[in-house]
Amino acid sequence: MFEFKTSIHPIPTNQLFLYYLVIFIIYVAFLRKVKLTTLSLVILLLFNQGFIILIDSSNRPSKILFIFFSMVILLKSKFNNLDRREFRILFLSVLFTILFFMNYIINGISLLWGAYQYYKYFVPIALFFAINGHQMHHNEATYYGKLILKLIMFQVIFSVVKIAVMGIRENIIGSISDLGGGIGIGYAIMGAILYWYMKGKDIKGKDWWFVLSYLMIPIASNKRAIWFIYPIIIIFLMLDKITRLSLRRISYIIIIIPFLIYFGFRLNPSLNPEKKLWGSFDPQYAVDYARSYSGVSEEKLQSSYSQGRWGASMAILNNTFHNPLAKESLLGFGRSRSGKINTDIFDPQDYGIMPGTMISSIGIMIVQMGWPATLLLIILFINIIYTIPDRKTANIIAFYVLWDLIFYSGSMINSPVQSILLIFIIQIIKCLNTTNDTIVKSSFDRNPSFAASYNTIGIQ
């Protein structure tokens, strides 16, 4: 049961349906009294695409519904004059859209397929402006923040069910998706950031149980990167409290960070010498593995071809720097109907990349749509993140998004299952920031119905 399996291993039908039956029963038993607004429907759809994928593996109904809900919210929104930052975001969105479709036009690919792929960028950008125009007030932001945290806790419980029914395997992320990727990592980290903010930018006492429980989502999918990035995020979140020299808060960090590293390296078969669940603790082995996986180990660097996520992306970046005005550098390669790189045209060996090696998102994006569109998209999302008035919170989110983009899958901006969550959390934090932080913390701590419902995983 506890042998790790990748996404290529098929799931027995009886296990798959048993798993979804169990999580459906859990939902019915505990998910109560949700206000069915358009925004809450988008959030519920975001967290429950797995049920739709069970029926339609291409997830077309979810894509249609996301577009529909985004347009409904846009049409219902009240827009005043855009401020300077919002106008800049709109301007960047238009420029990116032009470059995105230019790739399809010049490479002779149907614009219909281009529009089908463009939806993953249209939906989060549309939701950003739609929620802005919705003019969410403090009570709404608090409610939607609580709802997201509740649904993340459901994913924690579903991850435990997943291990019990199917064991530890890369695919199936709670009720969110049928594939792992960076989803488990993204939801754990963004959940921790939102929880921290709604607790008045402090984590103490029983709060740690919730923050650490989020790790069950990537654990159930055997995600390696979480054990390197989660401790860093926790340190960033607690940095202000540490500098205040509170002995209690410092002790939390002294205990929890080594705890995360120790248990993480032993729980992940890739990060211990025995390559098994609960292998021995060997930090040097884990670091060496991470360097080799990224393509920056001494052995990989001596190879005639670049390997690993970061090594391959570095090769693409170097080629782009040397030939910035080449057609492929400016517009990328033609795509297949699925939106992936057309491998009949793109040869990784031309870039000095080992065929079959994984490439981090920054490299893939440049090859897919060229460096100008890639740069515009990154600047666009960074501008969206920095609409959060609280600079520390914006810095932490921007750091994680850029880390994901440069070193990992980049799904925080390239996949709606992550980018929609990012937009909601940005807008919720931005709205809550307009009120006094003590009010935010008070509404989280002192509301008896919420305290009870959070502990019982119900919505009140």
Image: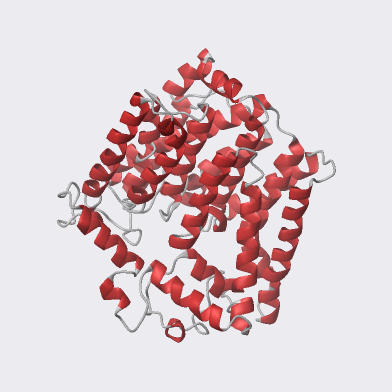
Whether 120 is drawn above or below 318: the answer is above
- Residue 80, position as x, y percentages in the image: 84, 41
Q: With 101 as the anchor, is 340 left or right in this view?
A: left
| Image quarter in which the C terminus is found | top right
Q: Position of residue 354 (x, y in %)?
A: 37, 79
Q: Residue at x 46, y 23 (%)?
A: 454
Among the 4 quarters of the image, the one containing residue 370:
bottom right
- Which residue lies at the image location 43% right of the left edge and 33% below the top edge? 243
Q: Which residue lies at the image location 39% right of the left edge and 28% below the top edge?
A: 245
Q: Decide: is 212 above or below 221.
A: above
Identity of the residue drawn at 50% across and 82% down: 346
What colour scheme was applied to this rendering of the protein? secondary structure
Location of residue 275 by image quarter: bottom left
Along the line of sight, which residue is nearer the eye, 323 or 350? 323
Image: 455 above or below 358 = above
What percent of the width, then of the height, locates residue 30? Answer: 46, 25
Residue 201 picture location, percent across and down: 51, 30
User: Is 288 in front, or is 22?
Assistant: 288
- Marker count (numbered): 0
Q: Residue furthest right?
A: 81
Q: Is residue 180 left or right of residue 274?
A: right
Residue 246 at least partly seen: yes
Q: Does any portion of residue 1 appear in the rendered image?
A: no
